Image: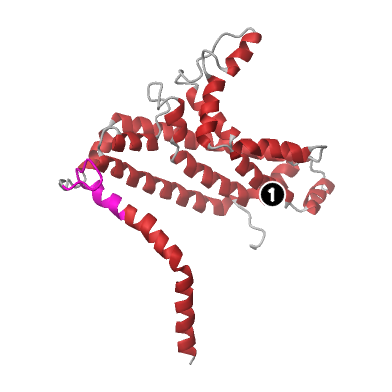
Amino acid sequence: MKSKLRRYDTLIFFLFISPWIIGFSLFFLVPFGTSVFYAFTDARLPGAANYNFVGLSNFVDMFNNPIFSKSLGNTAYFVVIGVPIVTAGMLLLAMLLNMNVKGIALYRTFYYLPTLVPIVATVIIWRLVFNSEFGILNAGLSVLGIGKIDWMGSEGLIKPVIILLQVWISGSGVLIFLAALKNVPKHLYEAVLIDGANKVQSFFRVTLPMISPSILFVVIIQTMYNFQMFTEALLLTKGGPNYAAYTFVYNIYKSAFTDLKFSMAMTQSIFLFALISLVTFVLMKLSKRFVYYEGEK
């Protein structure tokens, strides 16, 4: 009787999760398997009837391509440099929005509004702000006697402009940090103050450890986002100047839809998937040393 009930419960369980299983299979497993298959061929278009198996030659060509190296270096810059800056900016803004001042709810609403704007519209607005000829920022600088700055035409400035854009649209991450800050027990601050700690010491001894799970979550999400950055590179400068904003996903897009090298695009996609998986695994392993969970001993 118990075995029948157990089988019945198992059947009900799989019945309830069947929509997820079907969706996961159709929208992840099948596309992933197709990508792996085409990565070992010379197919120029998806579904092409004429193709040959070329083994690992696509992977060899990928690593020998200087544009691939450039796009990988740019993406690494946004991950290694951009993620800490954006995460720190989110945390700083969350701490400011956590202050008990008059009208703070209005400030929180105003800061979150850019997150509601589609990323395409935000990038277009950014182009108007940083345009070298008639941009709003250069107009303001001219009032101060500063000459025009070619923000999007400079190899050294285009990456900081994109990172600043990410800070601008970081309302969701700020809300996560704000919720984490609200949940820090007040008695912990009182305890360290009694021990003689100042506000800076209480931040490092209480605030950071208590919100470390939220920091880990934001870092992982931001890392994945930067690995897959595409819209900013396409709409701001189309990867320029001189490939300075040529991200990895933009290179995949160009390989598939401009160069018509579908198999090469699939090869790069598999490499990106493996790279994101590896970095996420390393972050999760390192988190055991730095992330504090209150429920754990």
Q: Which residue is mark 1?
A: 179
In this rendering, position of residue 172 left or right of residue 251:
right
Q: Is residue 256 above or below residue 34?
A: above
Asked whether, in this view, residue 10 is left or right of residue 92, the answer is: left
Q: Is residue 64 above or below residue 147?
A: below
Q: Position of residue 127 (x, y in %)?
A: 52, 23
Residue 136 seen in render: yes
Q: Which amino acid does the dot numbered 1 rest on? A: Ala
What residue sits 75% from the left and 44% below the top? 202
Instruction: Provide the residue span drawn in magenta.
Output: 33-49
Residue drawn where x is 38% and y is 21% of the image: 242
35 or 257: which is nearer to us?
A: 257
Q: Residue at x 25, y 52 (%)?
A: 37
Residue 289 is a magenta residue: no
**Secondary structure under badge 1?**
helix
Residue at 32%, 33% (x, y): give it: 254
Q: Is residue 27 above or below residue 233?
A: below
